[in-house]
Image (spheres, rainbow, N blue to C red):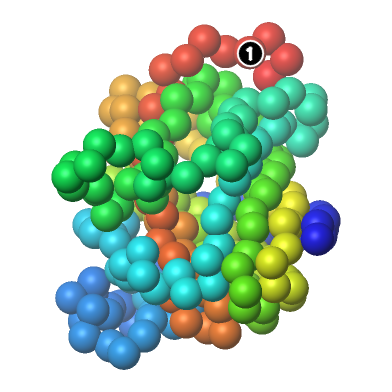
Amino acid sequence: MTQEAIARTRSRRGLPQPHSRPTVTEEELRLKDYITPEDVMNLSCITKDYLCSHDANVYDIDFIRFKIRDMDSGVTLFEVAKPAGYDPKQHHTPGEVIDPDAGRFVRYHFSQGFLKLQSVGATVEFTVGDKPLTHFRMIERHFFRDQELKCFDFEFGFCIPNSKNSVEHIYEFPELPSDLMKEMVENPFETRSDSFYFVDNKLIMHNKADYAYDEPDVAAL
């Protein structure tokens, strides 16, 4: 069964204000029985490692397609999809040690023009296992070095068991100072993000990404 939705959650433009919440460290979070949305919001910098294991995904959520587009021009900026019927267990040599963090990290290459975009749509398709998802939520935090650039908070809504789902989240980016953009371009992969996924306010997935702005500009941008 397939469900489709458009998440029109929009964030205020502008760089985040200085961190005023009580701060917490990764080490402190690892001592907890489970990690909540409030916990990750209280981190003052990008994480060094993953805050949960693959095994925490007891709902068998599998992201199978991802597309990023410029909302103003409609130009597709990035798109990737898993082959139909893909099973990672069938694509390794017997005895080979499988990286437990495989599939949790993405390295993006965008153009410098990407930094000037105002609104970007991110469409994600995912499947769900035998358990329903209630209060499925993603918090995504972007940093350049130790400076927070933006925090996004999206609700996926309720997902029925054994379903295929599609949702588009609308990212509204802040206007970046020209000197900051220059630094981000000149220092590839020092712009990074943490994507935290929660069900019923418990962390079940954690993905990471980094970014370089070294691709040719698309004319439509």
Question: Which residue carries the number 1 mark?
Answer: 218
- Answer few, some or many: residues within 10 Å of disc 1's Cα (few below 14, many 20 plus, some between 14 and 19): some
Q: Is residue 60 visible?
A: yes
The percent position of residue 31, horizontal first and vertical second, equals 21, 85
* Relative vertical location of residue 204 with respect to residue 143 in this rendering, above or below: below
Using the rendered view, name the quadrant where residue 167 is placed: bottom right
Please state if 75 lies on the left or on the right of 187 as rendered: right
Quadrant placement of the C terminus? top right
The percent position of residue 168, horizontal first and vertical second, equals 74, 50
The percent position of residue 174, horizontal first and vertical second, equals 59, 46
Name the residue rendered at 24%, 59% in the picture: 49
* Relative vertical location of residue 201 with respect to residue 179 in this rendering, above or below: below
Residue placed most toward the observer, 13 or 158: 158
Residue placed most toward the observer, 202 or 37: 202
Name the residue rendered at 64%, 54% in the picture: 126
List the single residue furthest toward the front: 94
Label 1: which secondary element: loop
Residue placed most toward the observer, 46 or 200: 200
Q: At label 1, which amino acid type do we have?
A: Val
* Relative vertical location of residue 59 with respect to residue 124 in this rendering, above or below: below
List the single residue furthest toward the bottom: 33
The percent position of residue 43, horizontal first and vertical second, equals 33, 70
Quadrant placement of the N terminus? bottom right
Q: Report the label total.
A: 1
Name the residue rendered at 37%, 37% in the picture: 91
Q: Is residue 172 visible?
A: no
Name the residue rendered at 45%, 70% in the picture: 57
Residue placed most toward the observer, 173 or 48: 48
